[in-house]
């Protein structure tokens, strides 16, 4: 935590022991067979959100992540909160720029037990275009009002990433990624 006059800055970039992030998956094949609904995936170096429809087959994946902000005193004034994710968006087959939604999760979950069938519900916060530039890059989300609500006493269940667009994919590096500088970052400036 850094302090600059009356403003304080908290930078959270958890590693695999402190970070809570997971990918939940759903696959349904032409035959009607469904799989991966009950398999936890909290140790992946990437968390993916996407949806693919091919005939009667469908694949859906969503990413969940949570930061421990308990170091900030209740009712502090949050001046700025930015969620930064390193990764890339994959352009869909219609050549449209992919969009993903950042959502606020509204129920508890654990990265070692969360699955598609027991994932928490959510409230949409915002949508972001992921411009694919051939290489991974940083994507920033303004989460100031959400962090303020959590500091004011609303329960922090974390964030999710999802999409409703067919053949859109976003690959985000998780807290388990070996290169620490590429893990998810939450930067908060507060008083």
Image (cartoon, rainbow, N blue to C red):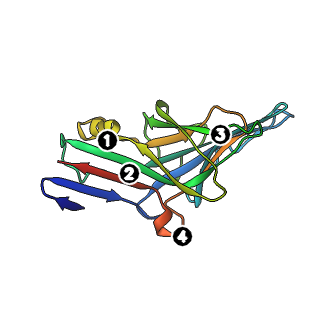
Q: Earlier in the sequence, mark 3 or mark 2?
A: 2
Q: What residue is drawn where x is 54% and y is 65%?
A: 177
* 71 horizontally vs 60: left or right: left
Circle 4: element type: loop
Q: Nearer the viewer, mark 3 or mark 2?
A: 3
Q: CA distance from mark 4 to mark 3?
A: 29 Å
Quarter-wise, where is residue 100 in the image?
top right
Q: Nearer the viewer, mark 4 or mark 3?
A: 3
* 36 horizontally vs 82: left or right: right
Q: Earlier in the sequence, mark 1 or mark 2?
A: 2
Q: What residue is drawn where x is 46% and y is 56%?
A: 184
Q: CA distance from mark 1 to mark 4?
A: 27 Å
Disc 4 to disc 3: CB gap under 8 Å: no
Q: Position of residue 91 (x, y in %)?
A: 70, 44
Q: Position of residue 124 (x, y in %)?
A: 48, 30
Nearest the camera: 175 or 113? 175
Q: Earlier in the sequence, mark 4 or mark 3?
A: 3
Nearest the camera: 48 or 38? 48
Can residue 167 be seen here?
yes
Q: Quadrant of the N terminus?
A: bottom left
* Disc 4 crowd, CA 10 A, few/some/many (<14, 14-19, 20+): few
Mark linked to residue 178: 4
Q: Which residue is mark 1?
A: 147
Q: Which residue is mark 2?
A: 67
Mark linked to residue 97: 3
- Residue 107 sits above or below residue 9 on the image: above
Circle 2: element type: loop
Q: Nearer the viewer, mark 1 or mark 2?
A: 1
Mark linked to residue 187: none
Q: CA distance from mark 3 to mark 2?
A: 28 Å
* Disc 1 crowd, CA 10 A, few/some/many (<14, 14-19, 20+): many
Q: CA distance from mark 1 to mark 2?
A: 10 Å
């Amino acid at each position: 935590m850094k302090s600059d006059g009356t403003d304080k800055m908290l930078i959270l970039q958890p590693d695999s022991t402190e970070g809570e992030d997971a990918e939940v998956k759903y696959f349904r094949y032409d035959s009607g067979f469904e799989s991966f609904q009950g398999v936890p995936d909290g140790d992946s170096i990437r968390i993916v959100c996407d949806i693919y429809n091919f005939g009667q087959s469908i694949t859906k994946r969503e990413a969940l992540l949570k930061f421990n902000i308990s170091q900030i005193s209740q009712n502090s004034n949050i001046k700025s909160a930015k969620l930064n994710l390193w990764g890339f968006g994959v352009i869909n087959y219609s050549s449209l720029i992919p969009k993903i939604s950042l959502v606020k999760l509204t129920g508890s979950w654990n990265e070692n037990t969360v699955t598609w069938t027991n994932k928490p519900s959510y409230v949409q916060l915002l949508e972001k275009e992921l411009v694919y530039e051939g290489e991974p890059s940083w994507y920033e989300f303004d989460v100031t009002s959400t962090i303020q609500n959590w500091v004011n006493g609303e329960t922090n269940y974390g964030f999710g990433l999802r999409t409703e667009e067919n053949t859109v994919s976003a690959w985000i590096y998780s807290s388990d990624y070996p290169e620490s500088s590429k893990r998810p970052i939450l930067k908060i400036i507060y008083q």
